[in-house]
Each structure stands twice: as structure tokens, then as C-alpha cells.
Image: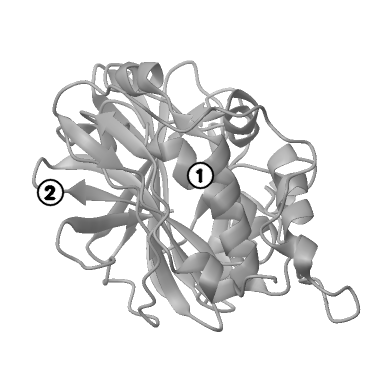
Amino acid sequence: MRRSARQCLMPVMLLGLFVGGCGGPAASEESQAESKPQDGTSQVSTVVENQEYEAVPNASGASGQDKTDFKPYQAPEFADSAFHAEHAQGNEQVRIDLEHAAQGYIGVSGQSSTRLKLQVFKGEMEYRYDVPADGTPVIFPLQEGDGIYTIKAMENVESTKYRPLFTLDCEVKLEDEFQPFLRPSAYVDYDRDSECVRLAARLAEQEEDALGVVGAVFEYICDNIVYDTEKAQMVQTTSGYMPVLDDTLRTGKGICFDYASLVAGMLRSQGIPTKMVFGDVSPNDVYHAWNMFYTEETGWVTVKYEVKAGSWNRLDLTFSANGKDASLIGDGENYLDELYY
């Protein structure tokens, strides 16, 4: 008999990890991500078998469904993001495209012989990003809801010192609160042709609703992706790491940043709003990444990748429905969410 979506989601799925740290979001050394402490070095002990990537995944429970009753999940139209040079404003060094602010993102392109950064402010919140200096456009979310954002582009002059290149204010009125979390952006980078998107679509067509798709994606990742000890050690000493979602699938391994980015990309591609959350995990103040997703049936739900330095740990794909209150992280005792992407 086919398992219901809730039966698939509510049990805690466990993957044993022995870790001493977890790579945070990799901006440069000046970013808020790398200012966080990380105790020890990451190690991995027994984990589930690292199965080869399956071209045709075995979706959860679909085989037992009477085909006359089964109606597959229908994903909405793919929500894309793009930089439009004709709408961009700025100067010869940096161009900022605000054309799709109502869809929850901006596009930025920069040219420089040195490093470029972008700061995005709204109220007390500040986000810092690296911008490619070769003119490659990059997408950044407007994830703090409606209101006035201040966007500041800066150029490195020496060491950790930067000078402003261009600043503008943008009043944002989102089409809805989910827009920033339905699309590709710098930290969750994919397109229509990404293998992770094709995989998500194959999983989705074997499920009946959004909650079933969530369960199938998490089950697949739990079964096929293991913790990457070497990468965890590398990101603690190297700045600028960014996940490549299809590489995580192909190699079958990753750090918390990779897990959270892959989950977000696969679910977003199927029209399921998904946040990637960064914050601290007590008691060791490990800077960490996890997810929140939204369906009409559940409201916002948190998925936590639990890490405690120097001891046996579980990769808990834990589901806890909290309505629309994004401040509630599971039981709320040891997770502090700080930044959303």
C-alpha cells in the first residue's frame, strides 16, 4: 500500500555522522559567514553506503498505487531568474538590474581588476556577497520581505578595505512572500537543464502532492549523499566556496551547505517554496545550514542538519510544522537562524 505523504515525512530519518564542524556559506574572509567560530575538524565515521547516482530513482511507495486512482503532482511553471542588461543601472564598473524586484531578486554584473562585493541592507539586516569581477551576471535574493532595500557595490582597494562604487535604494513590493524562495540565486544555482532539476521532476511525477515530493526528495538525498570530510576541512581554511548542485549529485557527497542548497534547488524547481537558512548550533556555536519549506497543507516546516562538535551525530531530516512562524526552528532549543537565502 502506498504510504501517505505524512507517513513519509513525519518519521525522523537518521544518518550517523561524527563531526567537529560544518562549512558555512563561503563568501570572502570579510563576510559574516566566515566570522563564525568552527570548533575542531570534521570527521566522518560510519555512514550509509554511498550508492551510485541513480538515473531512474525508486520513488517512495509509488509502486503500490492503483494507477486508476493515482494523479501525479503537477508542478507549476518553472520560476526562473535572469539579469537584463537593458534594465540595469549603475556605471562602467557595476550594473544593477531591479526589473524583477517584485519577483524577489536583483541581478548584478561587475567589471574590475580587483575583488568586488555587494552589500544589501534592509532595516537591521545586512547581507554581503562576492560579485564576479569578469562581468558574469549573478542573482541575489530580496529575502527580507517588502520595504526599502539599500544596495551598495564596493571595490577592494587593499587588504580588507573597500571603496563604494555605486549605491541605490529600492522600494520592494513582492508579488507574494514566497517569490525569493522559488527561484535560482547565487547560493542555490540551477536552471531548467540541471540534472538535479530533472531528477526532482522524475521524483515528483511519482508523487501525488507537494508533501509527497518533499518526502521523496529528502529520502533520495538521505539515501544517496554522504558527508564530505575533506571538503569540510577545506572550507574552514579557504574562502569563496559555493555549492554546485549537480556536482553534489554526481559525487554523492557534500557538507551542510551542499545539502541545504541541493534540497532548496530541487524543491524550488518543482514550485515548492524553500529557504536555505544559516545560523548557529549550540552549545558549540557551529555555523551551519538547514532548510525550511512551505506547502499549503503544512505552512513553513523546518528541516535540520544537526551537528555537534566532537561526538556522534545524526543528519536529522526532521519535520515540524510551525505555520508561517519562521522564527520557530524545530524544538527551538539549539538552533538560531540568522540569514535566509
What residue is at 54 percent from the left and 27 percent from the top? 50
Give the quarter of the image for residue 325: bottom left
Q: Position of residue 315 (x, y in %)?
A: 36, 45
* Label 1 element class: helix
Whether residue 54 sits left or right of residue 234 in the image: it is right
At label 2, counting other C-alpha atoms closer than 10 Å, the crowd grade (few under 14, some 14-19, many 20 or more) is: some
Q: Position of residue 289 (x, y in %)?
A: 35, 46
Residue 32, above or below 338: above
Give the quarter of the image for residue 54: top right
Please tell me which of labels 1 and 2 falls first in the chain. Answer: 1
Which residue occupies the foreground of this view, 304 or 182?
304
Whether residue 105 sits left or right of residue 284 in the image: it is right
Residue 134, above or below 322: above
Q: Which residue is mark 1?
A: 222
Look at the image and tell me whether residue 282 can be seen: yes
Give the quarter of the image for residue 16: top left
Which residue occupies the foreground of this view, 220 or 273?
220
Q: Which residue is mark 2?
A: 282
At label 1, counting other C-alpha atoms closer than 10 Å, the crowd grade (few under 14, some 14-19, many 20 or more) is: some
Quadrant for the N terminus, please: bottom right
